[in-house]
Amino acid sequence: MNLTIRIKLSLMMFLEFFVWGAWFVTLGTYLSTVLRSDGDEISAAYSTQSLGAIIAPFVIGLIADRFFSAQRILGFLHLAGAVFMYFAAQSASFSSFFPFILIYMALYMPTIALVNSISFRQMKDPSSEFAQIRLWGTIGWIVAGLFIGYLFKWESEGLLQNTFYMASGVSAFLGFFSFLLPDTPPKYIRGTKPSLSEILGLDALLILKDKNFLVFFISSILICIPLAFYYQNANLFLNTVGMENAAGNMTLGQVSEVFFMLLLPIFLKRFGLKTTLLVGMAAWTIRYLLFAYGDAGQGVWMLFSGIILHGICYDFFFVSGQIYTDYKAGEKMKSSAQGLITLATYGVGMLVGFWLAGEIYDTYADASGAHNWKMIWMIPAGIAAAVMVLYALFFKNEKINT
């Protein structure tokens, strides 16, 4: 990979996750404090991510793997998304906010698979090279959080509406920049007639015939149920218990993510995928226990420890899973396969998780509106531990080689 392509891919990843981190982390706090939403409404808003992820493999299979270059689709989706994010920022009630954020996430979630596919197509050894590009996405998320929590102080000053405007502007820029990315044409061979399953991207389901990948796929769905609790509740929880600059402090999780992103290729090649994912699952259990028993006083170290564990939680599960999926997929369906794993993780698993998190958030609220945060975190800790045990029993270890 030459330097120009590396810089373009790194900037693409930076902007891709800056756009997401600019508003997603503080969404729960914004809905609760500004739009006065309850747990069901908060979970509905977060569930738009999952609905978009469920749509993603069909969009990618229909277009990116068959007919149009991935970078052009990426540009169009981000330009359209910028418009809907702008209108979401202007919404004064949840009923008007929800349709715009729903359409936005239907446009945004396919772009995660697209940026992965564009990156993988430029690499000779994805298991070693991808982490070096993907870490710039983490840096983008960090910078977004620092802007919100420390530079602009939108969180502490009650100006979280501005996060949506910022996301809209950066999304528009990324849309135009996408047309300058390396050409990533479809693998579809002209003169051949694809089947309906190929057009819809369902051919990626063929990799589920591999029993090991099937176990990984099911585990990905199940572990994302407790994962949704973090995205939906963490920022709201930290603000509720009195942590100052919660959004800024939460970027420590992404700082640790950069470190573990660099460690990931070494860990994968030495210990294999099974151990890597087990470590990631264990980290989710430990993190929620730390949140359950921590506080903003003497127990603040537990809150910070839970935040910092994000590096292991995310890299050792999501990023290694993306690499494994690319390794298992055939040349003709790499984009479809990435869409499939996006469906399993951000889609089905988190959809259930966001719904459950909303129900538990309301269940453990008293008449005054205060919440029993210990129980809200203990439940996902137990789920993550159960999934870890099931995965350990049924998945056979693999060392990824290319």
Image (cartoon, rainbow, N blue to C red):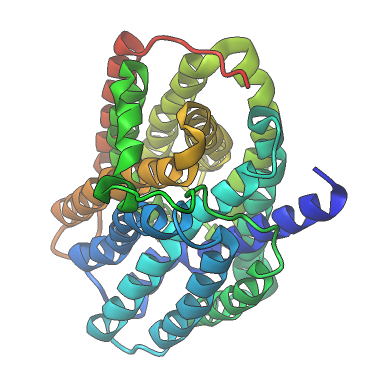
Quadrant that contains the C terminus:
top right
The image shows residue 139 at horizontal and vertical percentages of 68, 53
Furthest-right residue in this view: 3
Q: Quick check: 54 above or below 130?
A: below
Q: Quick check: 82 above or below 262?
A: below
Q: Is residue 17 left or right of residue 26?
A: right
At a point 68% along the width and 71% down the height, the residue shown is 177
Quadrant that contains the N terminus:
top right
Which residue is at the front of the view, 275 or 23? 275
Which residue is at the front of the view, 57 or 345? 57
* Quadrant of residue 265 within the rendered picture: top right
At a point 37% along the width and 59% down the height, the residue shown is 59
The image shows residue 155 at horizontal and vertical percentages of 53, 72
The image shows residue 48 at horizontal and vertical percentages of 30, 63
At a point 27% along the width and 33% down the height, the residue shown is 222
Q: Is residue 242 visible?
A: no
The image shows residue 45 at horizontal and vertical percentages of 29, 67
Q: Quick check: 384 above or below 47?
A: above
Furthest-front residue in this view: 191
Q: Is residue 103 left or right of residue 89?
A: left
